Image (cartoon, grey):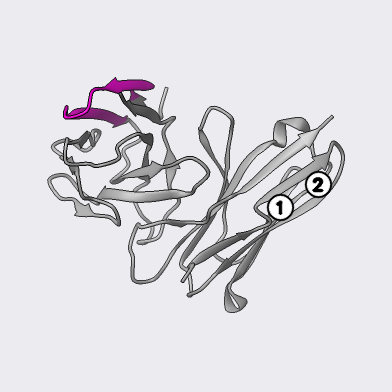
Amino acid sequence: DGGITQSPKYLFRKEGQNVTLSCEQNLNHDAMYWYRQDPGQGLRLIYYSQIVNDFQKGDIAEGYSVSREKKESFPLTVTSAQKNPTAFYLCASTPPGTGFYNEQFFGPGTRLTVL
Amino acid sequence: GIQVEQSPPDLILQEGANSTLRCNFSDSVNNLQWFHQNPWGQLINLFYIPSGTKQNGRLSATTVATERYSLLYISSSQTTDSGVYFCARETTDSWGKLQFGAGTQVVVTP
């Protein structure tokens, strides 16, 4: 069954702890993205990666880190430097291109709550 | 200023009614997508529509790139249409970076 999976669905963490959110896809998509959504708002881009071993900062990268060691996986680490980490985190990916601009597809999301 | 603006922010419909959601954007676009976010948070792709008109069942969308707006039409609304509708654009100078509007919260009552 092809798709984008995110785990865990819900995550609780204590202040000062780092936590890693998983995003996996078996769609052979090249580009992958991480977004953050706060209540009542649209999504904002944290990081994105066009190919393995390469990634770029989005609009709100401070306090986050990523890696892209495999095409299928793009984990996001929320560090203790992120001042307000409680949010809904969504991962997305884009099929191999017929051009630069392609449709993005989203995973089910992870709700992170800092206690 | 606001680069992707959606209106109205909230919409209450009676089942069976039709409605139009609007998305204005400040620059030219190479990618314009409409999404429906269900109550569980899943973003469901509705349309990839940088220009022109597309239809999918009771939903249709039109993007007029030269006038910098897109419209989403919901006809014969059903309670399952409830949720938040987002438009998102990608500009020519921001590869892969979707900029989202704040969304339109739609509630369809029986």
Distance in Å between CA atoms under marks 2 and 1: 9 Å
In this rendering, the label closer to the viewer, 2 or 1: 2
Do callouts 2 and 1 mark residues in contact (Cβ within 8 Å)?
Answer: yes
Read off the chain for label 1: B
* Dot label at residue B75: 2
* Dot label at residue B48: none
Q: Is residue A90 above or below residue A110?
A: below
Secondary structure under the numbered disc 2 in the rendered image: loop
Q: Position of residue A1 (x, y in %)?
A: 42, 22
Q: Position of residue A50 (x, y in %)?
A: 24, 51
Read off the chain for label 2: B
Q: Position of residue A43 (x, y in %)?
A: 43, 48
**The furthest residue to the bottom:** B66
Q: Is residue B74 above or below residue B52?
A: above
Callouts 2 and 1 on one subunit: yes
Main SS category, magenta section: strand
Q: Position of residue B68 (x, y in %)?
A: 58, 73
- The three-letter code of the residue at mark 2 reads Ser
Can residue B16 be seen by looking at this rendering? yes
List the residue tagged with mark 1: B60
In which quadrant of the rendered image does the C terminus of chain A lie?
Answer: top left
Question: Residue A53 colored magenta?
Answer: no
Left or right of B74: which side holds B54? left
Q: Give the residues in magenta.
A: A7-24
Mark 1 packing: few (<14 Cα in 10 Å), some, or many (20+)?
some
| Residue at figure coordinates x 42%, y 55% from the top left | A102
- The three-letter code of the residue at mark 1 reads Ser
| Residue at figure coordinates x 35%, y 61% from the top left | A100
